[in-house]
Amino acid sequence: MNTEKIQRHNERMKTQKKIVDTYIDNADIERGVLIVITGNGKGKTTSALGTLLRSLGHGHQCALIQFIKGQWDCGETRFFAQTDTLTRLSMNTDFTWNSQNFTKDKMAAKAIWQQTLPFFSDEQCRLIVLDEITYMFKYHYLKLDELLNALKNRPIQQNIIITGRAAPKELLECADTVSEIKAVKHAFNQGIKAQKGIEW
Ligand code: ATP
Ligand code: MG
């Protein structure tokens, strides 16, 4: 870059820094956030797990609740089994399109929801990840109002991450951060087999 271009770049960076500094100065509220990661692209659960790792790294007590997934032997399950600051719960059933049993799945959803409730009143629990919970409302296994109520009454510093496609609009409305992952391409559509360490 010539001198003139470098000077223009530096000016732009100065302006950018001013904007960012103003945002930082204005953001002075300290409370937990509700993050929703939705959309059809790959990266929702893995993004939530990344933040979970970050929180655990700071020594926080966390909970990972996996709806839909069942007793799958995922890499994350193996890895997190070593972590005593994490409680992990998963649904006592298989993928819904495998089991095709509405009553059984609804009972399993209700059971895991009952086990999840105490975390919403535990001030020591800094982060709860509700992985794939959006499907519980889509399939009418759980009532959205019960989740909205638990979110509203949780400890002020508690963070929540919700993942899953088709997040209900009421949930998006009460979230602080919403990211929608767009599927631009997926290896599966090119016939590439799902693989250990990438898909599970
Ligand atoms: P990941 O767990 O990899 O972050 P995800 O949580 O975004 O994925 P889910 O909808 O929960 O995606 O689906 C889980 C599985 O489906 C993963 O194995 C993922 O690779 C695969 N998958 C996600 N998006 C797509 C897509 N657009 N097409 C095909 N397969 C997909
Ligand atoms: Mg997922």
Image (cartoon, rainbow, N blue to C red):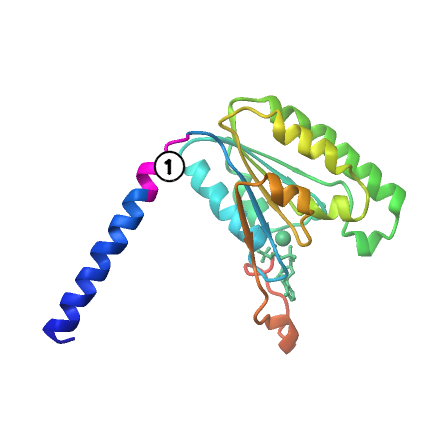
The secondary structure type at the circle numbered 1 is loop
User: In terms of depth relative to the viewer, which is nearer, 194 or 133?
Assistant: 133
Q: Quadrant of the N terminus?
A: bottom left
Residue at 59% from the left image edge and 26% from the top image edge: 154
Rendered location of residue 67, percent (x, y): 70, 43
Rendered location of residue 135, percent (x, y): 73, 48
User: In terms of depth relative to the viewer, which is nearer, 183 or 188?
Assistant: 183
Q: Quadrant of the C terminus?
A: bottom right
**32 in magenta:** no
State left or right for residue 102 relative to residue 55.
right
What kind of residue is marked 1? Ala
- Total marks in image: 1
Neighbour tally class for label 1: few under 14, some 14-19, many 20 plus, Cα within 10 Å: few
Q: Which residue is mark 1?
A: 27
State left or right for residue 105 relative to residue 181.
right
Rendered location of residue 52, percent (x, y): 50, 41
* Residue 78 falls in image quadrant: top right
Residue at 35% from the left image edge and 37% from the top image edge: 26
Outermost residue toward the left in this view: 3
88, above or below 93, in the image: above
Residue at 78% from the left image edge and 44% from the top image edge: 93
User: In terms of depth relative to the viewer, which is nearer, 29 or 81?
Assistant: 29
Ligand 1 neighbours mark 1 (CB distance < 8 Å) = no
Residue at 30% from the left image edge and 49% from the top image edge: 19
Rendered location of residue 168, percent (x, y): 69, 47
61, above or below 106, in the image: above
Range drawn in magenta: 23-29
State left or right for residue 115 relative to residue 63.
right
